[in-house]
Amino acid sequence: MNQVTEGYLCLFTLKNPSFPEYINSADSGVMCLDFHYKHAYLVVVGLYDGTVLVYNVQLLTKEWQFQSNSVSNKHGGIVWQVCWGKDLPDGEMNFYSISSDGKVFNWVLMQNELAQTLVIVLYMDMDPIPGPDGNMVKITGCGSCIAFHPKEPLIFLVGTEEGNIYKCSTAYASIYLYTYVAHHMPVHRIDFNKFSPEIFISCSADWRVKIWEDNRSEPLFVFDLGCSVGDVKWAPYSSTVFAAATVDGKVHVFDLNVNKYKAICIQSVVSKKQNKLTRLAFNSKFPIIVAGDNRGSTRVLKFSPNLRIKPKPKKKEIVVDPMALELIKLNRLLALFREPQALTHPPDVAVVVQ
C-alpha cells in the first residue's frame, strides 16, 4: 500500500447522499473511524502514519480536538482499527487502537492531551531469535482488527496478519487468554453476534468466513467465498443473518436459519475490474447496508423484505420477547453443530433374586 499524504473525513446523510454534510482533512490517509456510543459528535480517526485524532463535528472549527504526539506518542505502523471503550469510573472518555506495529493502545481524553497506555504487545508464539546486538528478541505479530466483548468490557479479541485470533484482557498485558488458529492469511474483521456474545464471526484474505464459539478451537461454520473477504458484520435485527464484502465487488448475505451452506443473496455492487469492496456496515435502525470500496466511494443498499424476516411464536404459545425468539432460533441452529455432552455410565445397582 502506497503512502498517502492527505486524507479526508466525510459525513453523509441519507437525505443528501451525493455530497457530504461535513468534510475535514488530515495530514495522512484516513484508515478507520468510530463514533462515540453516547456522544455521536465525537469521532476518533486512525491514520496511515500511525496517528490517532479525535474530532468534534459540532464545532465550527475544522481543527482536531485531540491528536497523538507525532514522535513518541503514536503507533509505529498503520492504524487499522479504532474503537471507543466504556467511560472510566471518573468519567473520562477513552478509546483503543490497533496497528500493524503489533501493539494495542488505550487512549484517555484528558483536559488538553491524549494519555497513552500500552495494553498488549502481540508477540508471536515462537522461540526468540538473535537480534543485531546478539540479544534474543521476540517476534512481534502485526495487528489488523480488534473487537470488544459486548458484556465483558475487559475482554477483547484481536486479529493478526498472520491469521491468528487472540483472546485478551485489559487486565493482563503479557498473556493471551486463548488462541484461535483461525486463518491462513490476514484477518480483516471480527464481529460479535448482537444477540449471543459467545458467538463471533471472522473474515480473512484466505477467502473464508468463519463462525466461532468462545473457547472452542474449531469453527462452527466455514464459508468459502472464492476471493479475499474485506469485511463481515452480523445483522442488528437477526441472530442468524450476516453480510460479507469481497474484493470482486460483491456483497454476500447469509441467513443460517434459511440456508446453512449458501448465501441467500449475492449482489454485485461495483465493477471487479476497477474497484474492490473493503468495508460494509449495517444501519442499526433501518434495513439498509453501506458498502465502501478502495477508491473512496460508498454505496447504500436496501434489504428486500425476504432478507429481514423476523421469527414469530407458534400458535397457542405464550407471547415471547423478540430478543428471546432470536436466541431460541440461534441456539436451535447451533445445537446441530455443537459437540454433545459426554454421557456418564449410570451406577450399577445390585439386584437380589429370590
Image (spheres, grey):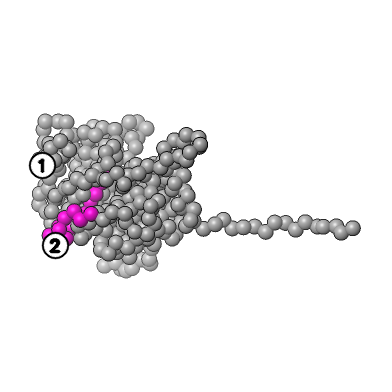
Out of 318 and 144, give the one closest to the viewer.
Answer: 318
Q: Earlier in the sequence, mark 1 or mark 2?
A: 1
- Find out whether residue 277 is within the magenta segment: yes
Where is residue 233 drawn, in percent x and y?
Answer: 31, 49
Q: Is residue 243 above or below residue 217?
A: above
> Which residue appears farthest toward the front when viewing the image?
315
Give x and y (percent) for residue 152. Answer: 42, 42
Amino acid under disc 2: Lys
Q: Nearer the viewer, residue 204 or 100?
A: 204
Q: Amino acid at mark 1?
A: Ser
Q: Quadrant of residue 161?
A: bottom left
Q: Which residue is mark 1?
A: 18
For mark 2, what is the residue? 273
The residue depicted at 29 percent of the width and 33 percent of the height is 38
Of all residues, the one furthest to the right in this rendering is 354
The 10 Å Cα crowd at callout 2, few under 14, some 14 to 19, many 20 or more, is few
- Residue, x 16% and y 48% (percent of image)? 298
Label 1 element class: loop
Question: Real-space Cα distance between discs 1 and 2?
Answer: 24 Å
**Highlighted range, magenta:** 267-282
Residue located at (37% from left, 55% from top): 259
Q: Is residue 59 shown left or right of residue 202?
A: left
Q: Is residue 179 visible?
A: no
Quadrant containing the N terminus in the rendered view: bottom left
Count of all numbered marks drawn on residues in the image = 2
Q: Is residue 141 magenta?
A: no
Q: Which mark is residue 202?
A: none
Tell me, yes or no, if residue 33 can be seen here: yes
Q: Is residue 63 above or below residue 140?
A: above
Residue 35: x percent and y percent? 24, 39
Between 352 and 102, the one nearer to me in the picture: 352
Q: Secondary structure at mark 2?
A: loop
